[in-house]
Amino acid sequence: MTTHSVDSTTTETNAAPESQRYRSLLSAARGLVRCDAAALLRLEGDVLRPLAVDGLSDETLGRQFPVASHPRFARLLESGQGLRFAHDCGLPDPYDGLVAGQPGILPVHDCMGAPLRLRGDTWGLLTLDALEPGAFESVSPAQFDALIALVETGIESAHTIQEMEARAMREQAVAQALRSGRGATRELLGSSAAMKQLCSEIDTVAVSDLTVLLLGETGVGKDLVAQRLHARSRRQDQPLVQVNCAALPETLADSELFGHKRGAFTGAVQDRNGKFEIADGGTLFLDEVGELPLTVQAKLLRVLQSGEVQRPGSDRTLKVDVRVIAATNRDLPAAIAQGRFRADLYHRLSVYPLVVPPLRERGRDVVALAGGFLEENQHRLGARNLRLSPASKAALLAHGWPGNVRELEHVISRASLRAFTEQGRGARWTAIEPHHLALDATAAGSHAAAAAQTPLTQAQAPADGGHATFTLAPGGTLRAATAAFQRAWLADALARHNGHVANAAREAGVDRSNFHRTLRKLGMRPASAD
């Protein structure tokens, strides 16, 4: 089953919005009991939040009423069956000045209200207000009870509709994940000793629910390992949901993983399912987990410990059954020492660590992998029999592959296009030669770019394996010399880290985005992507 990033469902439904359903309830309530204003307030912790108002100004909807600061509301919640306050009650009225269409703060008016319950728990309050003192004296206890029953029934119905909508959205997201997972997939190829050992480990741990941490360089195929783990697990018929943690902005990472309630923050116009909810019953693959912000790491740890998710903006917890697979190319123990990754989260994730070997340690697997990529490109280009020449096979086996399988895929794609363009459609086969692979240019990478633009000359690397030394060429300005030194230094750093920008940036002590910006400014491009 392949991994696909599944967007959390935020599709609008045809049903009336939640606020409209509550306003309709208030209209029905005012039909039973004549009043000048009515409100439904939801109890969230120790605060009452207006969900709908009728006869009160829109300003009311922007307010929150701490129960401890509003004794009338506190009395209503404690009353059990509701209360009517005398018009000369000395308790401050929270709605003074908020009745719509009035020129100033009202000195006195009648008010009554009652606590509302949903499935045995206190849900909030219904409040009714009249401008005329004594207006509610004619409301009988039977009328009041009927009014409360009407509103509670409406709230129950609204809550049921919300649950059905949430269930439908999640089922839609799960169905999308399952459909995506049944498409064309790639298998873990290779018969090297390193790959046989890895596949044996995968099959051992796949049948369990243990959390797995995949370790390995960029481009080694950690996503394919996650797919195999899921496909051989008891969850194989459930969704495999992938999250690229490196692509999550810190401000949205919380919402992406755990969802949110409508109104939790600016722009949260409706409830949203998080990836943990969508993956419930299945597997969640957290790729590049080392890039998660510390604040999100703490919340992820709580979910792994308790199996419970709490959406931002909600006081409810949701129980989820999710098998977590995480992957990183970072040195997490070093990140822990630097205060950038939580040690307790690392231990939770690394219950069963698996190291995915780099391509340079897999021997002749490179030829088998190249064959698979050639087959893909053959169909894509409409070419006949893309074949590697013996010299090309030797070149592939001799290459160091700093970008691993991803680099090999790109090399084969470029070589296929070059060879097909050069030899055309009429040939019985299309031979890929070493010059089509252009491996020398790939290996040179940023070194070639730096050498072409620098007035510095690079000396031989020291025999002890230390950094290369640089000498200043005669002539040129200070600005040019400074830029040249930066190019040479950055090229050397990238080479030490096999073109991995994030690792080179950490060594340089700068943010990765700033490192990228500096490379672009100097006209440099890394040999391989992060």
Image (tube, grey):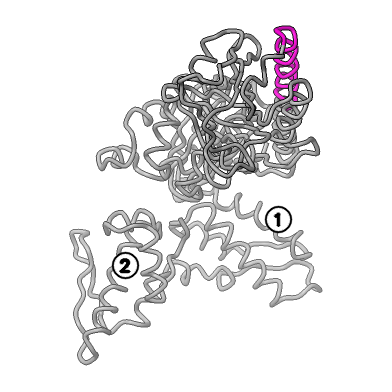
Report which quarter residue 86 is drawn in: top right
Residue occupying the point 45% across, 27% down: 66
Q: Which residue is mark 1?
A: 376
* Location of residue 85 by image quarter: top right
Which structural element holds mark 1? helix
Which residue is pictured at 61% across the width and 29% down the height? 277
User: Does residue 441 lie above or below 152 as drawn?
Assistant: below
Q: Amino acid at mark 2?
A: Leu
- For residue 490, which numbered disc appears in the image? 2
Q: Quadrant of residue 215?
A: top left
Task: Tell me the quadrant of the picture where the N terminus can be found.
Answer: top right
Could you give the CA–CA distance between mark 1 and mark 2, rounded to whole angstroms? 35 Å
Crowding at dot 2, Cα within 10 Å, few <14 / some 14-19 / many 20+, comes out as: many
Q: Earlier in the sequence, mark 1 or mark 2?
A: 1
Q: Nearer the viewer, residue 405 or 476?
A: 476
Asked whether residue 471 is drawn in magenta, I would say: no
Q: Is residue 423 left or right of residue 369?
A: right
Query: Who is closer to the viewer here, 237 or 194?
Result: 237
- Residue 458: give x, y in percent of width and height: 25, 76
* Residue drawn where x is 36% and y is 27% of the image: 347
Tell me if residue 240 comes above or below residue 462 in the rendering: above
Tell which of 425 and 225 is nearer to you. Answer: 225
Provide the secondary structure element on which disc 2 rests: helix
Residue interval drawn in magenta: 140-161
- Any part of residue 174 in sight: no
**Residue 63 rendering spot, x and y as whole percentages:** 52, 37
Amino acid type assigned to the residue bearing label 1 in the image: Glu
